Image: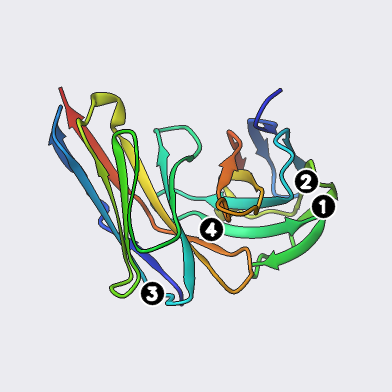
Amino acid sequence: ETGVTQTPRHLVMGMTNKKSLKCEQHLGHNAMYWYKQSAKKPLELMFVYSLEERVENNSVPSRFSPECPNSSHLFLHLHTLQPEDSALYLCASSQDSSGKVGEQYFGPGTRLTVT
Amino acid sequence: QKEVEQNSGPLSVPEGAIASLNCTYSDRGSQSFFWYRQYSGKSPELIMSIYSNGDKEDGRFTAQLNKASQYVSLLIRDSQPSDSATYLCAARSGTGGFKTIFGAGTRLFVKA
């Protein structure tokens, strides 16, 4: 596997379900991000982890719970979601070294539908 | 509210022409700027980063930054139909944080 991978690629869940999204980066990066992309809206940053410590939490509802067990893996745990949470969820990683600050590499995304 | 603004388009250019994409940002503290390309149904792909005023060239792409005017642009020379995509502009604060603000994107169509 190369780059940033995400599983599952598609997910349909009911409002009472609990599910988790998984992201893995194979780039040796030290920061990982969760974004939400809804139709006709800009990418919305949800969470950022740097060296496994959460450094950004962008006023995201508590029904979304991130977990970063190590610098290569990132999870987004979902529970009691609402239909308006249906979107593409993107994971990204970056290595903030000289000359490359903030360059993010995205995974393919998980298309989430909440019914 | 810190914002990044882009014309949503669509911007239509003939094959071989120069496509010019523009972006403005509101946070004067922004230090790092990025252009991503996103094909329909795919995730964003980084194509350029720029950190200092002036031009930065990479192949057919040139990014331009003017911090005084809070303006970033992307020029695509010799545009190809395969360049047809949505181009996202992004800005990150220079205060040591990781927050990156994305624009809504400009749709580009390159006509063969």
Q: In terms of depth relative to the viewer, which is nearer, B105 or A98?
A: A98
Label 3 lies in what chain?
A: B
Tell me how many marks there are: 4
Q: Which residue is mark 2?
A: A75
Q: Amino acid at mark 4?
A: Glu
Q: Which residue is mark 3?
A: B26
For residue A19, say whether it is visible.
no
Check disc 1: other Cα within 10 Å, few if <14, some if 14-19, many if 20+. Answer: some
Label 1 lies in what chain?
A: A
Q: In terms of depth relative to the viewer, which is nearer, B52 or A78?
A: B52
Query: What colour scheme governs how the chains and residues are painted in the rendered image of this protein?
Result: rainbow
Q: Are marks 1 and 3 in contact (CB under 8 Å)?
A: no
Between the C-alphas of marks 4 and 3, the distance is 17 Å
Between the C-alphas of marks 4 and 1, the distance is 18 Å
For residue B17, say whether it is visible.
yes
Secondary structure under the numbered disc 3 in the rendered image: loop
Q: Amino acid at mark 3?
A: Ser
Q: In terms of depth relative to the viewer, which is nearer, B64 or A22?
A: B64
Quadrant of the rendered image containing residue B97? bottom right
Q: Which residue is mark 4?
A: A44
Q: Amino acid at mark 2?
A: Phe
Q: Position of residue A1 (x, y in %)?
A: 71, 22
Residue at 78% in and 46% down: A75
Q: Nearer the viewer, mark 2 or mark 3?
A: 3
